[in-house]
Structures are given as C-alpha cells and as structure tokens.
Amino acid sequence: MSPRRSIADLSADLADRAESFCRHYFPEGRKQGNYWQVGDTSGAKGQSLTIRLQAQGGRKAGAWVDYASGEYGDLIDLLHERLGSVTLKETLREVRSFLGEAPCPATPHATRNAERPDAASGKRIARARKLFAAGKPVLGTLAATYLQGRGITRLGPALRYHPRVFLWQDEDDSDLPQKAPALLAKITDNRGQITGCARVYLDPSTGGLAAIESPKRILGQLHGHAIRFWSGSPSSDLIVGEGLENTLSVGTALPEFDLASCLTATHLGLFIPPPGIKRIWIARDNDEAGCNASMRLRNQLESLGIACGELVSHLGDFNDDLQVFGKDALCRSLLKAMKAQGQEIEDG
C-alpha cells in the first residue's frame, strides 16, 4: 500500500476492517448486531458510542456516533480521539500500521500514553457538564413525579430534568437509539466542580423507572465524589449515603442535615470527605455490600481523625423504610440511632 494514498482511501480501508479495528482498539466494547458498542472514545465500558461494522441501507461501514456527547465521524476521527493524538500525522501513522504497511503494535499506542486517561476523563467530564446544563429544574416535571412517588420531598439544585436523553437498549439493534426522559443529578468534587452526571431514565406512562436494563447510568467521574444536597445552615456533620433515592429518603426525614450520595456501595467506600467536616454519618443499605462499604469508609475516616456513626435501614434500604413506615417514623428512628451513637462517640 502506498503511503501517498488519500485520507479517504485510508478511511475506506479501515471501514472494510471495522470489526477488527474495534476489537483491537476498543476491546472493552461488545458486538450488538451490526454495531460495536463502547462507552466513549477512550474505550471505556458502556453503550453510548456505536460503530457500524458493515454497510447497511446506504449507510457506510465505520461510521460512529457518541450519543452522550453528539460527536460523530469515521474511523480515522475515532482513532484520533482514541489515541489522544496531537497531530493528524500521528493518527495516520497508526492507521497505516494497523492496515499492514508497518508492524502493528501489540497494544494500542494510546495505552502507552501516560496522559491519555486524564485526557479521556476530561472529555467525559465535559460531556457530563454539557448534559446537566441542558436540563431544567425538576419541579413540575416527570422527575418530581418520580421522586414524590417514592415519598421523597428533599430536592435541590443538584437535580435537573431532561425530557429527551439518548438511550441505547441492549436488545435494540436499530440504527438510532431511543430518547427517554431522565432525572439528572450532578456529581461534584469537594471544590464544587462537576465531575459527572447521573442519569435515571424514567417511564412517562408510569412515572417510575424506565423498564430497561440498567435504568440508572453514570457519565463522567464518580470515584471519591458525590451528589450533594445542602441544608442551608453551616454544619460540621454530613450524612453520606449509597443510592440517590436512599440518601434523599434520609434527607426527607432529616432536612436539617447536609447530604452526599455516592450512588453505589463501592463508591460509598471510596468517598473523599470535604474539609471542615468533623463527623460523618454513613447511611447504608441493610446488606453485605453496604456493610463492607461502610467498614472501608469508617477505616478511612478514622485515619483522618473524623468521627463516624453508622445508620442502617430496617428494611432493604432507606427508601423502603420511608415508604413503609413514613417520614415521621423514619425521622424518629434515625435520631434515636444518632443520639445513641453520638453519646458513644463522645464517651470514646
């Protein structure tokens, strides 16, 4: 193959080998029908970015779209993003290597670029910020209906609503994804900077969660961060919970407390406490995963000299408690546990 071949020729050659290209540069993705699905241009796991593997209905092979960010292009564009290349020349050198003009490296050049993960993370964070900015206040929307249907009345500026967010379903092999309404929640670091956006897809006919696999998804970076809800009064105490609805259930019962939702048990255990906090209450689910996450966070907090208490739901989680027992009963139960442990902390 001549090195003088045009970019269009190189793009066409890549398209002819689209599936091999995907398996080589995006091994974390998976094949769904005539498409390769992956999280984003960095190659993370997920479904937001799709690559057409074979020409179909007049549509070219190799065309891709990232439905989370709106980006699209051909495989040269995608490889440029994947490598984090500074120049097009670098990307074309890799294209020719892959197509056989030069030996193809055993692993993508991008995996040897120490700066690539930061660059990729930055792109995902930018997309998350863009998505959250496109939302509107939740009051009077389907998102408010969803939360109120679960007994939750604690809201805040960390929540927004968008009526049409791109959504891929595993069983859907159509060319375009669906669009579904979603509750959006901004994930922030301790400086208040947005690092991610949680999406809770909703069913407009029922007001509940959308009947799809994984109706709750995250765009951006969550590790160590959280969705935060402030009480409006300065406090040295903070309640840190697992899921969004569970944390807001505790906040509904205790509106005077600041909240941080880590979304999963794993990330609860990885939470980075903000400066100025003297005591953290870990609100966990009544299961093994919650117990292990709480233990990990408690060990971290103790090493930092931060007092720690644990709040455990009576049922599966605190939203179950709220819906079954009611706000007042949940409030009394939480305050009783906090009073007892508070005395233990002081005595200790």
Image: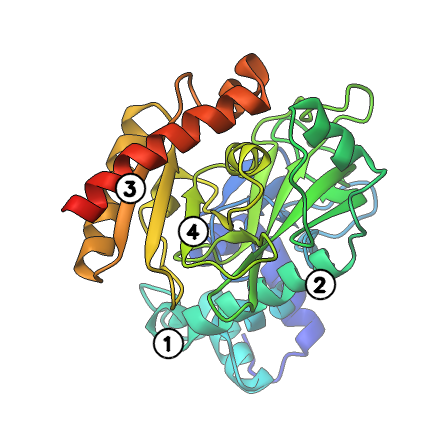
According to the picture, the residue beneath numbered tag 4 turns out to be 238
Which is more foreground, mark 1 or mark 4? 4
The picture places residue 74, in percent across and down from the top left corner, at: 68, 63
Amino acid type at mark 1: Asn
Amino acid type at mark 4: Leu
Which is more foreground, mark 3 or mark 2? 3
Residue at coordinates 24% horizontally, 47% vertically from top-left? 298
According to the picture, the residue beneath numbered tag 2 turns out to be 130
Which is more foreground, mark 2 or mark 1? 2
Vertical arrangement, residue 51 with respect to residue 172, above or below: below
Q: Determine the secondary structure under disc 4.
A: strand
Amino acid type at mark 3: Gly
Is residue 153 visible in the rendered structure shown here?
A: yes
**Mark 3 to mark 2: distance in Å?**
42 Å
Q: Earlier in the sequence, mark 1 or mark 3?
A: 1
User: What mark, if any, has residue 342 been given in the picture?
Assistant: 3
Q: Earlier in the sequence, mark 2 or mark 4?
A: 2
10 Å crowding of disc 4: few (<14), some (14-19), many (20+): many
Q: Earlier in the sequence, mark 3 or mark 2?
A: 2
**Mark 1 to mark 3: distance in Å?**
49 Å
Q: Earlier in the sequence, mark 4 or mark 3?
A: 4
**Mark 2 to mark 4: distance in Å?**
28 Å
Q: Determine the secondary structure under disc 1.
A: loop
User: What mark, if any, has residue 113 been given in the picture?
Assistant: 1
